[in-house]
Amino acid sequence: MKPHQNSEYRGPVRFRSKHYAGYLSPRASGSLLWGHMQLRLLVRVFLQRSVLLVFCIALNSCQSHKANSGPSIEFTHIPPAAQGGRERVDTISGRVRNAQPNQQIVIYAHSGTWWVQPWPDHPFIPIKADSTWSTETHLGFEYAALLVEPDYHPLPELNVAPTQGGSVALVTIVKGVGTPQFAPTGSLKFSGYDWGVRMIESDKGGTDNLYDPENAWTDASGALHMQIKKKSGRWSCAEIFLNRSLGFGTYSVTVRDTSHLEPAAAFSMFTFDDPASEQHYREMDVEVNGRGNAANKNNARYIIQPFYIPGNLFVFAAPSGTLTYVLHWESGHATFQTFRGRSAGAGAQLVSEHEFTSGIPVPGKAVPRLIFYVVASYKNPMQKPSEVVVEKFEYLP
């Protein structure tokens, strides 16, 4: 019998048996391979979609975090650190992130006090569509950028650095670039000391005054002449300042008759520490000006700044003739005195005396300054040039 006829030979039959675990028919083998490929494809698609899902979640989380983060201000151009003045300007610019609609930027420059920039009548700087801002500013030693609400009303001048709160959403302060540059000054010798002479304008007294070194000079006897006179249609004044700090001690200045002064003309000896705005510049003053009319008897005052705090201002009547003004400065005490004549020694006639015991500054780097300047006066504006003569300045530790 041939093998393919009812033979007991089982080899080929056994190998064809579909129940044998080690054998697959071509059709079954192809089906399994196709299924395996499909499974791998599904796994790959699942992994890709899972990664995409994780990425989307992470991206959404980042965007949500960004949307919920607060605003920030960065500077892209910072002017130099320099003492300010009307003619000393530069550009300051930057970028705001996460600002709210209608918010704007306000800039203050710190030079003596904090001055709003570029001018009090133009304080608001719009934020552009690309989140940038830019403006002209007068120079200062520090610059503050404020992100403010539409209802914010900036003051022209601040005694201390601006802070966040209320309509001020954010404040960022930076120092000016480079080594601090001080404004040019003149110089003179008076009473054995070297003094600087102011050359840039100031708004001390509530009005913008020019200052000219020609307005302060000493004569052959050594007396100091300080003048107020017109220059280019504006009042030009005189101020000198000692080139070093003297600290606690007794300061005195002898001044010839000031009874001729107009109400808007004032002479003052005061202490001043330019960088110490947080301590109100360690300023203490004795000041005298013209009466204007007989009813205004009190034409002089002793002051611990800020003057508006109760007890920080004492007014008195300065008589005609030569007077000597004295400040005794020690820890926790400041005593002012005024004497008739050229001496504060024994036998001198005392005109006025007052002791302050609250808010007395420590010396820091405060220096004595002498100034003859115009104060704002709507009732009695300055009418004509004027002069005071200071015979001597003395200091005793």
Image (tube, rainbow, N blue to C red):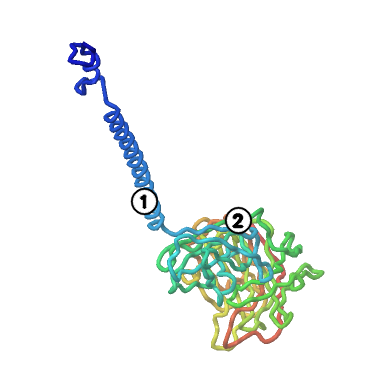
Residue 26 vs residue 335, the one in the foreground:
26
Q: Circle 1 is placed at which residue position?
A: 61
The disc labelled 2 sits on which kind of residue? Lys
Q: Circle 2 is placed at which residue position?
A: 365
| Local secondary structure at mark 2 | loop
Point out residue 113 in the picture as x, y percentages from the top left corner.
56, 66
Point out residue 221 in the picture as x, y percentages from the top left corner.
79, 69
Quick check: 109 left or right of 13? Answer: right
Q: Of circles 1 and 2, which is in front?
A: 1
Q: Residue at x 32, y 41 (%)?
A: 46
Point out residue 295 in the picture as x, y percentages from the top left corner.
54, 88
Q: Residue at x 49, y 69 (%)?
A: 104
Total numbered badges shown on the rendered structure: 2
Point out residue 161 in the picture as x, y percentages from the top left corner.
51, 62
Residue 200 vs residue 51, the one in the foreground:
51
> Of the numbered discs in the image, which one, if any, rests on residue 354?
none
Q: Between marks 1 and 2, how big is the CA–CA gap? A: 53 Å
Instruction: Single out the residue that lies furthest toward the right.
Output: 220
Q: Is residue 210 above or below residue 60?
A: below
